[in-house]
Image (tube, rainbow, N blue to C red):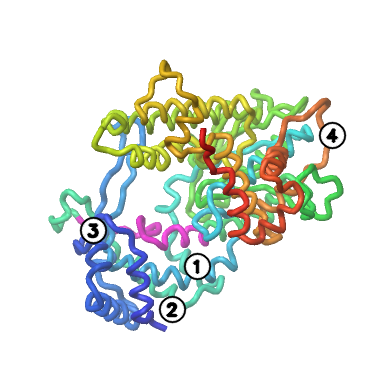
Amino acid sequence: MPPSLLEVERTIAKLKGHKAPGVCRIIPEMLKYGGEGTARWLHHVISVAWDSGEAPSDWKKALLVPVLKKGDTTKLDNYRGISLLSIAGKVYALLLQTRLEKWAETILSETQSGFRAGRGCTDAIFCLKLLYERALRKQKPVYTCFIDLSKAYDSADRQLAWQILRSRGAPTKVVDLIQDLHEGTTCAMHADHRHPDSWFDVATGFKQGDVNAPLLFNIYIDTVVRAFEPLVRHLGITWQYKLDGNLRECKNPTASNMSWIFMYADDIALVAETQEALQEALAIIDRVFIQWGMHINIRKTQILCLQSGTQTGDSSEQFWLRGQPLEQVQMFKYLGSICSADMSMQPEIASRLSRAGGAYHKLSRLKVWKDKNISVKIKVILYKVIVQSTLLYGCETWAVTNEDIRKLEVFQMRCLRRILGISLLERIPNAVTRAQCDIPEVANLIRYRRLRYLGHVARMGDTRLPLQFMFGTISGTGTRGRPMKSWNDYVRDDLEAIGLPYNWRRKCKNRDEWRAAIKVLLDVPSP
């Protein structure tokens, strides 16, 4: 059925403000604050498009703005084209998305964490790091290939995509309307779009900037992965688990699983226990991707060999794809978090400090910290939102030492003193400085986020990978001596710190109750 007026009004309310308009020059605020008359007008237009199966031509046009990603400004490959689409068309697309995503959740693989409700980068990072952690404890090597797909969204075959949606049971009317939105699509550079000759047709890939593009791509690549899964799944890594709520190392597992791929949209990590297995899987996957119109970017695809005890990843081992060698690295930035060959946290901490320092100094160059017209309260908010969030990105998955935390705390205190205009020579205690800014110690912030994520994982269904990994293990012989502290070990310490070493899982089931229990870590004591 076509969307109701109430549904259109609710969708308009979801629009984010301060967004650039498309070719129709309608900005979000015009719809959000246009009143009932505007909503009724848009509802009428959407209803006509819904019934006729043909969207207005302006909803199929995109204005391209080139944005430099990084590197040489003279190389076109270093630019990403940002598409400005019709805002009214975005409301139409959002209505289609709500109807499609409910069905999509029933067919997408558990290994896909990208652009799905209740999932995110943290889940994918967590699973990969815990796999490394478990393997390191049992002296098992892990070979990982981080696959980069060339222009993944732009290379998808549209006609094949519509066939996939229909064959897998997507709502027929929704598929027809999405297909119509992709027919007759045109683009022009924003600078010269007024010239009729500047417009060109776009016949492949999903519409960039369209709210449905990530979901459509997820379904597309999920189908591709299922095509080669029977051929390569057995080449992955087997691990065991027991969902008993015990955070200590799993001794008597009751179930097993096999990991061979982790995905966040088009960011793919392929894992295997041997060099030969990974090499074989790569060859198969590359062949299938080509059959589906997608290509692995050999230049950007990299190999990471986890060094575990006596069975280390030999840097002399070479991996090949289509007769070309793949680069082997000692560390790789996966979804913004650094994975290293020896599971050391030092590269990650160094990266966080560098990026947070860059964020702080950008604001410093704008004279934000020294501006007397900006209150300390606003400066602290800016620090939390821009600097601290960068500093602690992904800390939910960290297994950090006291020395790592000390480095982060030193950085935070340096920032807070500058915000308050305090010199080290004044010898003001750190506790006083933190109290003035109402910011907890870094150690407590990490504990809070780690425990908050623990609650999120504990509330997951039994089929979810993060939950299984949290209570999982890998068969093998442990290392001699005391092993490196794992994420589970640190979480147990965190639970001890808030007085919940035993009944934590029961409290986790109630989100509000769990948040209240761990909020004590955010309290800033008076000096």
Task: Evaluate whether residue 355 shows in this view.
Answer: yes
- In three-dimensional space, the C-alpha distance between marks 4 and 3, rounded to whole angstroms, equals 60 Å
Q: What element carries label 3?
A: loop
Q: Mark 1 points at which residue?
A: 101
| Res. 73 image quadrant | top left
Mark 2 Cα shell of 10 Å, populated few (<14), some (14-19), many (≥20) = some
Number of the label disc, if any, that sits on residue 173: 2
Say which residue appears at 24% left-offset and 37% top-offset.
373
Q: Which mark is residue 21?
A: 3
- Quarter of the image where one finds residue 482: top right
Tell whether label 3 touches label 1 (CB within 8 Å).
Answer: no
Q: How far apart are marks 2 and 4 (CA)?
A: 56 Å
> Farthest right residue?
252
Task: Identify the amino acid type marked 2.
Answer: Lys
Vertically, is 422 above or below 140? above
In terms of sequence position, does the residue under pointer 2 or pointer 1 come before the other? 1
> Which region shows up in magenta?
199-220
Quick check: 132 above or below 244? above
Badge 1 marks a residue whose secondary structure is: helix
The amino acid type, in three-letter code, at marker 4 is Thr
Crowd around label 1: few <14 · some 14–19 · many ≥20 (10 Å): some
Which is nearer the N-term, disc 2 or disc 3? 3
Q: Where is residue 374 shown, x and y percent of the image?
A: 27, 38
- Choose the circle earlier in sequence order: 1 or 3: 3
